[in-house]
Image (cartoon, grey):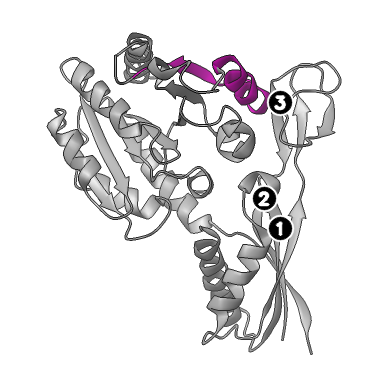
Amino acid sequence: MHELAVAREIIDIVQAEMVRQNLHRVESVVVRIGALTGLNADALAFGFEASVVDTPLAGARLDVQQVPIKAKCRACGQEDAVEEFVFICPCCGGTDLEVIQGEELDIDHILGE
Amino acid sequence: MTSKVPIEKKVLGKNDEIAAEIRRRLQKGKVVALNLVSSPGSGKTSLLERTLGALNHTLNLALVAGDVQTENDAQRLIRAGGAKVRAIVTGGACHLDASMVAKAIAEIDLAGVDILFIENVGNLVCPSSFDLGEDMKVVVMSTTEGDDKPLKYPAMYRRSSVLVINKTDLLGQSDFDVERAKKNALSINGALTIFEVSCRTGAGLEAWYTWLTALAARKKGGS
């Protein structure tokens, strides 16, 4: 699915960083993926491995850090983990919740030289 | 020696930049932009056909229709009365991205347009990650699907503002329970505005048209 498109974006960004920061080898790329992105970590890693061949990132590994969803209730202010995508405040039953974590789709850092 | 090099960049940053540019352009023209998403066959094109037919005389409507392989949907919509219709054939891609939309709307004269509909590819997973510069996402579900669809595709329901439940004329023909479907959707997103319609019989569509008309008026009013 779109994991391949996302993997290619990651490779493009890292490739540009390699030039900018004068790196000649990347061992791994660490990404943070929020649960709300709907991205499958295994499919993403597979898409990455399949796409790095013949790029300056050849041999690099994708390390996916999954970020669970957290939300804050706009009614009572309670901050809580959101389990199973049920956006109902466990404290007051409110449904107006602001997502404070779980939307991430970021490259955090790379290990390289 | 291997060392840790911070990057701290959004993976879809490039897409988000293009989407922001589209949003600025539409905002300037006071155009409402709606991104329609659903599984294949829920009735996005039927809903748009009906909408173009009903509102084309009172509102200036434009439409970008994404399809994986054909221009069939766009052709249907042009026949329904839309002069400002552009097709995006994604050539296999499972979602629209902002650059495809930017290219398509560059070919449309947006002057005076009230509402731009963006019909996404029928898929409830991939399109949720790609901002297209829209004001809001409208998710369409139909009574021939499972009423647990929102629970299966929570990211899309969470990111949508409006839910249209289509094919209500078929209620009772399947195990679909409309109240359970609404409850499931609202458990993920309590702020959803919900319409129950049948694009086949026209039932419930008046409320949808009224809502669209009010939305366009509010945008033109400057808010």
User: Dot 3 corresponds to which residue?
Assistant: A97
Relative to B216, is B121 above or below? below
Element marked by disc 1: strand
Using residue B129 as the reference point, say whether residue B186 is left or right of it.
right
The N terminus of chain B sits in image quarter: bottom right
Q: In the picture, residue B65 is in which quadrant?
A: top left
Along the viewing direction, whichever of A77 and A39 lies nearer the viewer: A39
Which dot marks residue A104? Answer: 2
Using residue A9 as the reference point, say whether residue B105 is left or right of it.
left
Using residue B206 as the reference point, say whether residue B134 is left or right of it.
right
For the residue marked with disc 1, what is the amino acid?
Answer: Arg
Q: Residue at x 51, y 87 (%)?
A: A54
Along the viewing direction, whichever of B186 and A16 lies nearer the viewer: B186
Q: Say yes or no: labels 3 and 1 on the same chain.
A: yes
Relative to A65, is B40 above or below? above
Separation (CA) of disc 3 from disc 1: 22 Å
Q: In the picture, residue A113 is in which quadrant?
A: bottom right
**Dot placed on the residue nearer the N-terminal end, 3 or 1:** 1
Label 1 marks a residue whose chain is A
Q: Say yes or no: labels 2 and 1 on the same chain.
A: yes
Label 3 marks a residue whose chain is A
Element marked by disc 2: loop
The C terminus of chain B sits in image quarter: top left
**Dot placed on the residue nearer the N-terminal end, 2 or 1:** 1
Magenta stretch: give its range: B178-198
User: Dot 1 corresponds to which residue?
Assistant: A32
For the residue marked with disc 3, what is the amino acid?
Answer: Leu
